[in-house]
Image (cartoon, grey):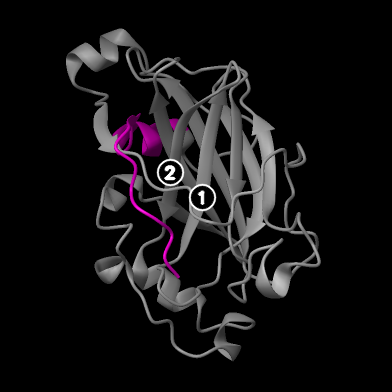
Amino acid sequence: MDEGKVTRRGSLLRLGGLVAGAIGIGGIESERTEGAGPAAVASGAVSCVLTPEQTEGPYYIPNEAVRRNITESRPGTALLLRAFVVNASTCKPIRGAAVDVWHADASGVYSGFGQGAGNRSFMRGIQRTNAKGLVLFRTVYPGWYPGRTVHIHVKVHLGGNVVHTGQLYFPDKLTDRVFRRVPYSRRGRRTTRNSNDFVFANGGRRSMLSLSKRGSAYVAAITMGVHRS
């Protein structure tokens, strides 16, 4: 499915070391942010990398519900998505940013479209960042659909403006492992991987989620640096 051309606008995503250090594997409500800020940027401990934004695709529905759990009891491997939003100039957390996510369910279906047309809300939701720039979403590992690798769509809104539109990606080896389980294993082999995805080819490597295992679930984390206007 053609999701349109990649946009020309740029966005800053701060990934790598700070994600591992700031997110850790501790409690989901208490996140560390030590080491952030101008001094860390100047010292090289934190780097801000310019990466192109990516298409929002054809499945966006505006004005979704503000909520943390977006599964609506649909099946799939549990996934906790942790997303930090920071000021790209200082790497300081931004409070009150609205983070909007949407993705396919385990069977590769989007709510509001095709087989999911009868429901416009599963696997969709909005959260506002806390004082540490953090939002949490409880969802499931996304399924695949023809022509695209596995991904999550994201928008970041500040002061009524969209300051970032992008997509978040998973390591193929991990996806292969997850897809050996039900309900994913009931489908045929996926047709597209990161290496041959036309959207991933434009900045996808800098939009990779950092993943860790927690019991039978996975924790996915990323830090997105944005311009405030």
Q: Is residue 123 shown to the viewer in this render?
A: yes
> In the image, what residue occupies the spot 57% across and 64% down?
141
Amino acid beneath label 2:
Gly
When the figure is inspected, residue 184 is found, relative to residue 10, above or below; the finding is below
Tell me the residue that label 1 is attached to.
153
Dot 2 or dot 1: first in sequence order is 1
The outermost residue toward the top is 39
- Dot 2 falls on a residue whose secondary structure is strand
Taking 195 as reference, is 169 left or right? right
Q: Is residue 27 shown to the viewer in this render?
A: no
Q: Residue 29 in magenta? A: no
Depth check: give the residue in front, 227 or 81: 227
When the figure is inspected, residue 56 is found, relative to residue 18, above or below; the finding is below
Amino acid beneath label 1:
His
When the figure is inspected, residue 100 is found, relative to residue 142, above or below; the finding is above
Q: Residue 2 in magenta? A: yes
Question: Which quadrant, please, contains the N terminus?
Answer: bottom left
For label 1, count other residues whose C-alpha is less than 10 Å away and answer few (under 14), some (14-19) or many (20+): many
> In the image, what residue occupies the spot 55% across and 41% down?
82
| Mark 2 vs 1: CB contact within 8 A | yes
Magenta range is 1-22
- Quarter residue 50 falls in: top left
Where is residue 162? Give x, y as percent: 51, 28
> In the image, what residue occupies the spot 42% across and 34% down?
223
Question: Which quadrant, please, contains the C terminus?
Answer: top left
- Dot 1 falls on a residue whose secondary structure is strand
> In the image, what residue occupies the spot 46% across and 59% down?
151
Where is residue 218? Give x, y as percent: 55, 58
Cα–Cα span, label 2 and label 1: 6 Å
Tell me the residue that label 2 is attached to.
166
Depth check: give the residue in front, 149 or 229: 229
Taking 204 as reference, is 110 left or right? right
